Amino acid sequence: QVQLVESGGGLVQPGGSLRLSCAASGVIVSFKSMGWYRQAPGEQRELVAAITIGGSPNYADSVKGRFTISRDGTKNTVWLQMNSLKPEDTAVYYCNTRPPYYSWGQGTQVTVSS
Protein backbone atom coordinates (compact mmCIF):
# COMPACT_ATOMS: atom_id res chain seq x y z
CA GLN A 1 0.00 0.00 0.00
CA VAL A 2 1.41 3.34 -1.06
CA GLN A 3 1.56 6.20 1.39
CA LEU A 4 2.74 9.73 0.68
CA VAL A 5 3.15 11.86 3.79
CA GLU A 6 3.80 15.56 3.36
CA SER A 7 5.19 17.79 6.09
CA GLY A 8 7.06 21.04 6.63
CA GLY A 9 4.36 23.59 5.96
CA GLY A 10 3.51 26.51 8.18
CA LEU A 11 2.94 30.22 8.42
CA VAL A 12 5.67 32.38 6.95
CA GLN A 13 6.03 36.04 6.08
CA PRO A 14 6.38 37.16 2.47
CA GLY A 15 9.96 36.68 1.37
CA GLY A 16 10.48 33.79 3.74
CA SER A 17 11.40 30.18 3.10
CA LEU A 18 10.07 26.73 3.86
CA ARG A 19 11.24 23.25 3.04
CA LEU A 20 8.59 20.65 2.42
CA SER A 21 9.20 16.93 2.57
CA CYS A 22 7.28 13.99 1.18
CA ALA A 23 8.06 10.66 2.79
CA ALA A 24 7.01 7.78 0.59
CA SER A 25 6.33 4.14 1.41
CA GLY A 26 5.21 1.42 -0.94
CA VAL A 27 6.74 3.21 -3.90
CA ILE A 28 10.35 3.96 -4.71
CA VAL A 29 10.55 7.64 -5.58
CA SER A 30 13.78 7.19 -7.53
CA PHE A 31 11.94 4.95 -9.99
CA LYS A 32 9.14 7.42 -10.65
CA SER A 33 8.69 10.91 -11.99
CA MET A 34 7.52 12.77 -8.88
CA GLY A 35 5.75 16.05 -8.50
CA TRP A 36 4.70 18.64 -5.97
CA TYR A 37 1.19 19.97 -6.42
CA ARG A 38 -0.75 22.66 -4.64
CA GLN A 39 -4.36 23.62 -4.22
CA ALA A 40 -5.47 27.04 -3.08
CA PRO A 41 -9.00 27.64 -1.74
CA GLY A 42 -11.49 27.66 -4.59
CA GLU A 43 -8.86 26.66 -7.11
CA GLN A 44 -7.98 23.46 -8.91
CA ARG A 45 -4.95 21.48 -7.89
CA GLU A 46 -1.92 22.43 -9.97
CA LEU A 47 1.52 21.01 -10.55
CA VAL A 48 4.25 23.37 -9.37
CA ALA A 49 7.40 21.26 -9.62
CA ALA A 50 8.40 17.85 -10.90
CA ILE A 51 11.50 15.72 -11.12
CA THR A 52 12.00 13.05 -13.75
CA ILE A 53 13.38 9.56 -13.20
CA GLY A 54 16.66 10.89 -14.55
CA GLY A 55 16.66 13.71 -12.03
CA SER A 56 15.77 16.62 -14.31
CA PRO A 57 13.58 19.21 -12.61
CA ASN A 58 10.92 21.37 -14.16
CA TYR A 59 8.78 24.09 -12.69
CA ALA A 60 5.64 26.07 -13.24
CA ASP A 61 6.40 29.58 -14.43
CA SER A 62 4.92 30.99 -11.23
CA VAL A 63 7.60 29.35 -9.06
CA LYS A 64 10.56 29.16 -11.40
CA GLY A 65 13.67 30.58 -9.78
CA ARG A 66 12.16 30.39 -6.30
CA PHE A 67 11.36 26.71 -5.73
CA THR A 68 13.71 23.74 -5.97
CA ILE A 69 12.63 20.11 -6.10
CA SER A 70 15.00 17.35 -5.10
CA ARG A 71 14.93 13.70 -4.18
CA ASP A 72 16.79 11.50 -1.70
CA GLY A 73 16.69 7.86 -2.76
CA THR A 74 18.23 6.60 0.48
CA LYS A 75 15.43 8.21 2.48
CA ASN A 76 12.80 7.65 -0.22
CA THR A 77 11.83 11.28 0.21
CA VAL A 78 11.07 14.15 -2.16
CA TRP A 79 11.82 17.70 -1.05
CA LEU A 80 10.56 21.10 -2.11
CA GLN A 81 12.67 24.07 -1.07
CA MET A 82 10.59 27.23 -1.34
CA ASN A 83 12.28 30.62 -1.18
CA SER A 84 11.04 34.18 -1.68
CA LEU A 85 7.55 33.08 -0.80
CA LYS A 86 4.63 35.22 -1.88
CA PRO A 87 1.06 35.43 -0.57
CA GLU A 88 -0.12 33.76 -3.77
CA ASP A 89 1.89 30.67 -2.81
CA THR A 90 -0.61 30.06 -0.01
CA ALA A 91 -2.13 26.62 -0.56
CA VAL A 92 -2.15 23.03 0.60
CA TYR A 93 0.84 21.26 -0.94
CA TYR A 94 0.81 17.61 -1.97
CA CYS A 95 3.21 15.21 -3.57
CA ASN A 96 2.41 12.40 -5.97
CA THR A 97 3.77 10.85 -9.08
CA ARG A 98 3.63 12.80 -12.29
CA PRO A 99 1.04 12.30 -13.59
CA PRO A 100 -0.68 11.62 -10.27
CA TYR A 101 -1.43 7.94 -9.83
CA TYR A 102 -1.73 7.23 -6.13
CA SER A 103 -4.24 8.42 -3.56
CA TRP A 104 -3.52 11.89 -2.30
CA GLY A 105 -2.04 12.33 1.14
CA GLN A 106 -3.28 14.84 3.66
CA GLY A 107 -1.04 17.57 2.28
CA THR A 108 0.72 20.28 4.22
CA GLN A 109 -0.64 23.80 4.59
CA VAL A 110 1.55 26.70 3.53
CA THR A 111 0.35 30.16 4.47
CA VAL A 112 2.28 33.23 3.38
CA SER A 113 1.08 36.31 5.17
CA SER A 114 2.38 39.28 7.09
Image: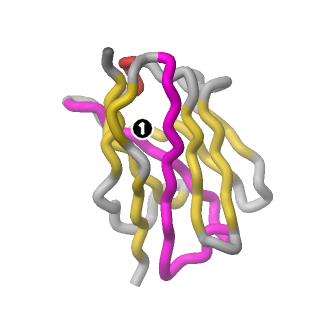
Give how far across and how far down residue 94 sits, in percent: 40, 51
Dot 1 lies on which element? strand
Please say if 52 is above or below 86.
below
**Residue at the limit of the structure toward the left, as seen here:** 42
Tag 1 residue: 46
Q: Is residue 34 left or right of residue 56?
A: left
Image quarter where the N terminus lies is bottom left
Q: Quadrant of residue 87?
A: top left
- Residue density around tag 1, few if under 14, some if 14–19, many if 20 or more, within 10 Å: some
Q: Is residue 37 left or right of residue 109?
A: right
Q: What residue lies at 22% left-to-right and 31% top-to-bottom?
A: 41
Vertical comparison of 79 with 24: above or below: above
The verdict on residue 82 being magenta is no
Residue 60, compared with residue 24, is above or below; it is: above
Nearest to the observer: residue 64 or residue 52: 64
Which residue is drawn at the image coordinates 55% and 34% (left, top)?
82
Q: In the image, what residue occupies the spot 46% across and 54% down?
A: 95
> Residue 9 in the image: x percent, y percent?
38, 44
Please name the colour scheme applied to the rendered image: secondary structure
Residue 32, horizontal then vertical, whole percent: 63, 66
Q: Quadrant of residue 3?
A: bottom left
User: Residue at 64% across / 45% down in the picture?
Assistant: 69
Quadrant position of the C terminus in the picture: top left
- On the picture, is 85 further left or further right than 3? right
User: Hey, what amino acid is under mark 1?
Assistant: Glu
Q: Is residue 16 magenta?
A: yes
Q: In which quarter of the view is residue 46 placed?
A: top left
Range of magenta residues: 15-41
